[in-house]
Amino acid sequence: ERPMAATAGDAAALRDKALAGSAAMVIECVVSNPLDVMKTRFQLHEGRVGGTAVLRASRELWRTGALWRGLGPAVAMQVPRGALKFTVADSVRGACAGLPFGSAFVGGGASGMIEAVLITPFERLKVRAQAFDAPGGIGASLRVLRDVWHAEGPAGLGRGLEATLWRNGLWNGVYFAAQDVLGRRSRQGGPELPPFLVG
């Protein structure tokens, strides 16, 4: 049986990892939201997009205050996502340590799939809030939620789940496997890689 101090230390490390993951994901979300709004608008745009479209769109989104649309659901999604991504991957990796193939890939894939189930409703609301015809202003995300709920019922919040399961499961699996291989190679006398490159 493991000593109580080790268990308390493991719990503290897990808590710290969950907090750090959540904070990092929220910061990334806030910084990248204007680009995400632009990406969504360009994907919904019909017709040809010219070479200066990004600059024109930036000015228009700034003028109308739409650069931050969808930020509420995006931030709400990132807090549990950041906590789950690293803690679940580490837990599953530890449980699968005896597998002959990549336990890091399995752990990452599992964390990605759990993450996908959790974030799909938030992503649906975020994209709807970023769309051209979505309401703006304070409470816009709640109005979008109400509109989706009334039009499609609770199942409307799960639209896109299958694709998100594949995307997040594969991406997290590859991410954690690559991180594991590069980290191991660096520790075993291979070329010293900067920590940011390994992560």
Image (cartoon, grey):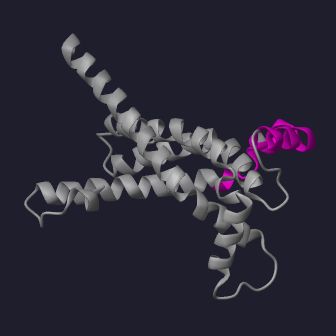
Which one is nearer the viewer's eye here, 94 or 88?
A: 88
Residue at left 37%, top 38%? Answer: 20
The quarter of the rendered structure image containing the C terminus is bottom left
Horizontally, is 56 left or right of 195 in the view?
Answer: right
Front one among 180 and 99: 180
Q: As drawn, which residue projects farthest toward the right?
A: 151
Q: In this view, does 198 lie to the left or right of 121?
A: left
Could one spot residue 2 in this view of the protein?
yes
Figure check: 165 above or below 191: above
Tell me the chief SS of the magenta region.
helix
Give me the residue at 27% from left, 62% from top.
Answer: 197
Residue 3 in view: no
Residue 187 occupies which quadrant of the picture?
A: bottom left
In magenta, the rendered stretch is 140-163
Q: Position of residue 109 (x, y in %)?
A: 47, 48
Q: Where is residue 37 in the image (x, y as percent from the top left)?
A: 66, 61
Q: Which residue is drawn at 65% across and 67% down?
A: 38
Q: Which residue lies furthest to the front in this view?
A: 63
